[in-house]
Image (cartoon, helix red, strand yellow):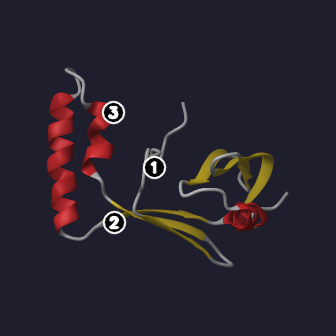
Amino acid sequence: MPKTMFAGFHGKASSRLYVTSDRIVLVRDIDDWRELSEQLTPLGLPNAAAREAELRKMKRMGVRQFCEIFPDNLRIASVKRYQKTLSMLDLHLVGSDGRRYGVMMWKTDGKDEAAITLLETRFHH
């Protein structure tokens, strides 16, 4: 199963997406409730409590989460674009080492065709 780097958030998320000539960087504030909501089951409660303490400590120190993608090392195997109520880009990528990656990016504040096009053009076809 693929590993999720950043789980999607319903509603407003405090994140910033930076697109440069060399990389794409997503930076967002830690939201402990959203990070822990999936683990709040009877069997996952001890792990969730330990993770909550760790997340709160990181938030007090001003830590943010980030993900860096270097698109020059990736080529697009397939792409899907959605432009109904929000803008979403679903990419299946192949690295220069042959590894496969799946990346989904979406804007929660409405349609933005220009941003989705910019993100897609950063990768090689």
Q: Earlier in the sequence, mark 1 or mark 2?
A: 1
Q: Are marks 3 and 2 in contact (CB under 8 Å)?
A: no
From this view, report whether residue 34 is shown above or below residue 111.
Answer: above
From this view, report whether residue 48 is shown above or below residue 59.
Answer: above
Judge from the rendering whether residue 29 lies leftward or rightward of residue 78; answer left or right: left
Task: Return the residue nearer the eye: 49 or 96.
Answer: 49
User: Which residue is tagged 1?
Assistant: 6
Secondary structure of the residue carrying tag 1 is loop
Q: Are marks 1 and 3 in contact (CB under 8 Å)?
A: no
Structural distance between the alpha carbons of marks 1 and 2 = 12 Å
User: Which residue is tagged 3?
Assistant: 38
Structural distance between the alpha carbons of marks 3 and 2 = 20 Å
Q: Residue at x 19, y 70 (%)?
A: 61
Q: Earlier in the sequence, mark 3 or mark 2?
A: 3
User: Which residue is tagged 2?
Assistant: 64
Q: Residue at x 22, y 21 (%)?
A: 43
Q: Tell me the crowding category of disc 2: few under 14, some 14 to 19, or many 20 or more residues within 10 angstroms, Cα based.
A: few
Judge from the rendering whether residue 61 lies leftward or rightward of residue 6; answer left or right: left
- The circle on residue 104 is none
The quadrant in which the C terminus is found is bottom right
Q: x and y percent of residue 42 in the render? A: 19, 20
Q: How many marks?
A: 3
Secondary structure of the residue carrying tag 2 is strand
Q: Are marks 1 and 2 in contact (CB under 8 Å)?
A: no
Q: Earlier in the sequence, mark 1 or mark 3?
A: 1
Instruction: Tell me which amino acid carries mark 2.
Output: Arg
Q: Quadrant of residue 109?
A: bottom right
Task: Return the residue nearer the eye: 97 or 69.
Answer: 69
